[in-house]
Amino acid sequence: MNVRPFREADAPAVARLVTAGVRGQWTYTPDRFHVSTDPARLRLVADRGGEVVATAHLSPFGPATPDALRLDLAGDPAAFTPLYLALLTRLPAGARRLLGVTREDWPETMHFFHAAGFRNAWQSWGAHLDLTRFDPIPFLPREERLYLAGYEVERLRPTAPEADWATLHALSNLAVQDAPRNPTTTPDPLGPEELRATVQREEVAFVMRLRGELVASTRLTPRGSSVESEQTVTARAHRNQGIATTLKAAALAWARAEGHTLAGTGGTVLNLPMLRVNTRLGYASEPMWVTWERRL
């Protein structure tokens, strides 16, 4: 086995290995992989007899964790340790810890991180909902009670006034502040204009109003036949009334009516209120995602 830097010619093999490593949850194509001149982004491969059998990649984990690098491994588990040791000799300046993310039912990476002395630091969940079997009717009585109290659900229009976009941004920041922190599931905060452009370009936002004022929101990202939901949040003064459940049920009903057949979501296991909301809506949980940490 030979451990060496990635070459452009390795891209098809690496794309195949990485896609297989995530069990086809995402499909990676060769054009995603290039030789990088960024010292914080380093990819090595292991070849045996001229065939690439494994790969390891270091990259910045994200702006919220500037001292951390993400370690990704794919391919033959027998190559993970030599790849890892080779990467340790090439760490960029300023790196203080390594983070690795894998699913609990992927034994090759789970076993590696445990054996290499990483700490099982954070856990997060994914869940899916079969929209063809989703029934919004049971959630209508609560929506009617909220309506009588002055609350109304609506889809946020792309031409909504500036005050609505400002409140949506404030709710987005509140969601980041109040959710338990997890480097894998805590998003980097978006600026006001960036959030607005993201929603208008690729998302569908639903909001709950109280006499005109936005007090809750949830966002959906359509992807073919499926939708992904994120950042369901209620202003603190309006919690514990079932607003999040009602709002998300209305958004899912819209997605179903639009012909989407599957809804996905996720978050940290410490976010118990959101876990309860998704359980009420009928989401089925998937194996947990585990974020491993190793201090350098």
Image (spheres, grey):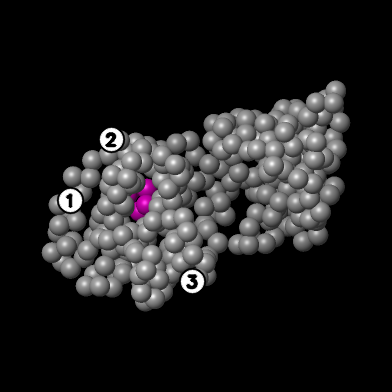
Q: Counting other residues with Cα less than 10 Å from the Cα at mark 3, is it few (<14), some (14-19), or many (20 or more)?
A: some
Q: Secondary structure at mark 2?
A: helix
Q: Quadrant of residue 47?
A: top right
Q: Is residue 293 visible?
A: yes
Magenta highlight: main SS: helix
Q: Amino acid at mark 3?
A: Pro
Q: From the top left corner, tell me how far across and down residue 61 is, in percent.
A: 65, 54
Which residue is found at the position 76% from the left and 28% from the top? 53
The residue that mark 2 highlights is 133
* Circle 1: residue type: Leu
Q: Position of residue 143 (x, y in %)?
A: 19, 56
Q: SS at mark 3?
A: helix
Based on the picture, tell me whether residue 276 belongs to the magenta stretch: yes
Depth check, front residue: 80 or 223 = 223
Q: What residue appears at the point 49 percent right and 39 percent down from the top-left corner? A: 288
Check the image and name the residue furthest to the front: 159
Q: CA distance from mark 2 to mark 1?
A: 16 Å
The residue depicted at 68 percent of the width and 35 percent of the height is 15
Residue under numbered circle 3: 192
User: Tags 2 and 3 in contact by the CB under 8 Å rule?
Assistant: no
Write down the region rendered in magenta. Answer: 273-277
Residues at circles 2 and 1 in contact by the CB criterion of under 8 Å: no
